[in-house]
Image: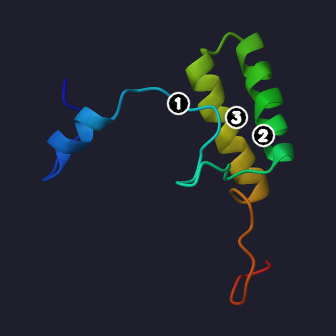
Amino acid sequence: MNVLSGPFADELQGSFNGEVTAVPKKKDGTSKYTSKQERKADHIAEGYEKKGVSKKEAEARAWATVNKQDGGGKNPGGSGRNKS
């Protein structure tokens, strides 16, 4: 079943295997998140798993919660960044 549609659907469909990685990584292999954010996501995921949510869904919800609470990964800093 092809879930994606559009001009690049065939290329994208083949590259997605449906797995959620534990911690998103940058090209250089370093984490996009601080160790505190990773611990927080692990703790949240464990809570969801205790409630009967699948591991894959629990990790997705945990990272969504961390992103919502902390505003995403590490703050890049520099000029022009809003502090609101």
CA separation in Å, label 3 and label 1: 11 Å
Which numbered mark, 2 or 3, is in the foreground of this view?
2
Residue annotated with mark 1 = 20
Residue annotated with mark 2 = 38
Quarter occupied by the C terminus: bottom right
Reply above or below: 9 against 50.
below
- The answer to which quarter of the image holds residue 78 is bottom right
Lower sequence index among marks 3 and 1: 1
Query: Could you say where residue 56 lies in the image, as x and y percent from the top left?
Result: 56, 22
Quarter occupied by the N terminus: top left
Residue displayed at 67% across by 40% down:
63
Residue type indicated by callout 1: Val
Residue displayed at 70% across by 34% down:
62
Please give left or right for residue 1 compared with residue 72 in the image: left
- The answer to which quarter of the image holds residue 53 is top right
Which numbered mark, 3 or 1, is in the foreground of this view?
1
CA separation in Å, label 2 and label 3: 10 Å
Q: Secondary structure at mark 1?
A: loop
CA separation in Å, label 1 and label 2: 14 Å
Using the image, tell me which numbered label, if any, was put on residue 10. none
Q: Residues within 10 Å of mark 3 (few under 14, many from 20)?
A: many
Using the image, tell me which numbered label, if any, was put on residue 62. 3
Residue displayed at 60% across by 14% down:
54
Query: Could you say where residue 44 lies in the image, as x and y percent from the top left?
Result: 79, 30
Q: Are marks 2 and 3 in contact (CB under 8 Å)?
A: no
Residue farthest along the bottom direction in this orientation: 79
Query: Could you say where residue 69 lies in the image, as x and y percent from the top left?
Result: 78, 52
Q: Are marks 3 and 1 in contact (CB under 8 Å)?
A: no
